Amino acid sequence: MKLILSCSGGVVGSRIQAQLDTAELGAELARRAEAALQPEKLAQASSPENPLRTDVLEYDLTLLPEGEDTDFRHYRFSETSAAPEVLEVLDELMQEIIRLRARRR
Amino acid sequence: MGYAPRPMSYAHPRHCILPPHMIEAIRLRGDAGLRKMADGIEQDGQRFRAARCELMPPAATRRTQPVAARARIKPERKVYDAQQRRRLPGKLVRAEGDARSSDADVDRAYDGAGATFKLFLNVYQRHSLDGEGMPLVSSVHYGKSYNNAFWDGEQMVYGDGDGILFRSFTRSLSVIAHELSHGVVQFSGGLVYRDQSGALSESFADVFGVLTLQYRRKQAAHEADWLVGKGLLGPDVRGAALRSLKAPGTAYDDAVLGKDPQPFHMDDFVYTSSDNGGVHINSGIPNHAFYLLAQNLCGNAWERAGHIWYDTLQSIDNPHASFADWADRTLELARERFGAGSTEAIQTRRSWKLVGIAV
């Protein structure tokens, strides 16, 4: 699964974005990412935001076309509208991005 | 369909079509039923006809009455352990009056909530976030290596940080007080969390975050560092904190995290669609205005400057307030409280002028 993931907002207000290929992240994480980042689960995450919540993270996720699928699928949602299993995978993917960048620092 | 307006209510005596800004205000200030209605309108994307425009029920816009006798008033704190899951609140690990735990994050969340409670009670006579003794609920260890802290409308939530970019978010009292201050904004009528009103919400939270720290340390304005989130950045991150009220735009400059994007003047106002229209970016402008006022007034920032800002939140009654609306109100209140020709009023006007806002 190839994707572009961006995480912004939060109490910090910064933005980190990267392109990832889950095949390069280890079999276990790749399996969980493919199970969690399914179009129907991500579509559910794009429900209206609760306006009382402040400093929450916002995700911008694009699933890139692979194989016979030629469509780009794009989702934008906040952490308060996504399912816990989706968020837990996104946390791990963000950690991979941060680790890789920190190594190159 | 007709109905009789209720005495002393906010009922609007006619049917109406709700424009987007009004829907936002309902979602911000209405009760659960009204918010659900507003969500439905937004989801449908259709014009909503024949709606009863009960915009602002009294409970949502309540202005709190100052607490007369505060000697025996205590906070009611609860700290939960989310056990590194993304589910709230988690397991209760410390309640009010319990002994210190063996977990530093639990104790910092508990103590930080207590310090914030004290500032609002002792200085502004406010009994907890809602003015009516609302329990202060926190969850720590939220998510795995989670790089954030937030207010969810009912409680505070803190991540442990990943140890690379951030350490645990409970390590900073200014961040704990920042999150709780969002609760104060919410229960004071609220500010729509987008564009300038959202940046005012962020700024209020930053200002009362640093004031909580200064109040606990008994630091005068000139003795404080005016940093939000000092001690949170990871060991190799180039920077001092998340934000600086003294020098917005200088808190960090790092290869991974990027550069602190905050402006301190309207000339550098950032127009963006991300971060809800730059709420954490443009908050640098009112943040710096507050810093200038406190610094020029000398003494303790939570006293005269803090009162002007707190009273502004209590009285502005405009969830879409712009920086100029907020600035105008601060000047009116400085004149009311201290006199038209007072140092406080003159310095309030001057502070806004220095960040590019004429009042």
Image (cartoon, coloured by chain):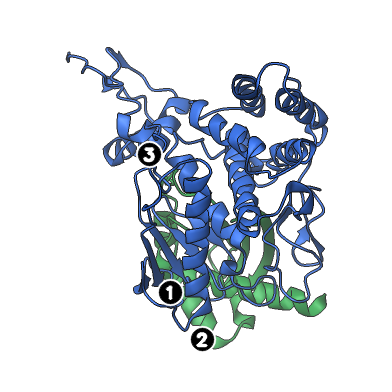
Q: What residue type is labelled 2?
A: Glu
- Res. B43 mark: 3
Check the image and report above or below for B286 versus B250.
above
Q: Distance between the residues labelled 3 and 2?
A: 36 Å
- Binning the other alpha carbons within 10 Å of mark 2 as few (below 14), some (14 to 19) or many (20 upward) gives few
Colour chain A is painted in: green
Q: Which amino acid does label 1 sit on?
A: Arg
Check the image and report above or below for A26 versus A73.
below
Instruction: Say which quarter of the image contains residue B68.
Output: top left
Tell us which disc is closer to us: 2 or 1: 1
**Residue in view at x 42 percent, y 71 percent:** A85
The residue pinned by badge 1 equals B85
Asked if residue A69 can be seen in this view, the reply is yes
Q: How far apart are marks 3 and 1 (CA)?
A: 29 Å
Quadrant where the image shows the C terminus of chain B:
top right
Q: Mark 1 lies on which chain?
A: B
- Binning the other alpha carbons within 10 Å of mark 3 as few (below 14), some (14 to 19) or many (20 upward) gives few
Front residue (pair A94, B288): B288
Quadrant where the image shows the N terminus of chain B:
top left
Which secondary structure lies at badge 2?
A: helix
Where is residue A44 shown, x and y percent of the image? 39, 55
Front residue (pair B179, B150): B179
Q: How far apart are marks 2 and 1 (CA)?
A: 18 Å
Colour chain B is painted in: blue
Front residue (pair B227, B275): B227
The residue pinned by badge 2 equals A28
Front residue (pair B319, B291): B291
Q: Which amino acid does label 3 sit on?
A: Gln
- Binning the other alpha carbons within 10 Å of mark 1 as few (below 14), some (14 to 19) or many (20 upward) gives some
Q: Do labels 2 and 1 share a chain?
A: no
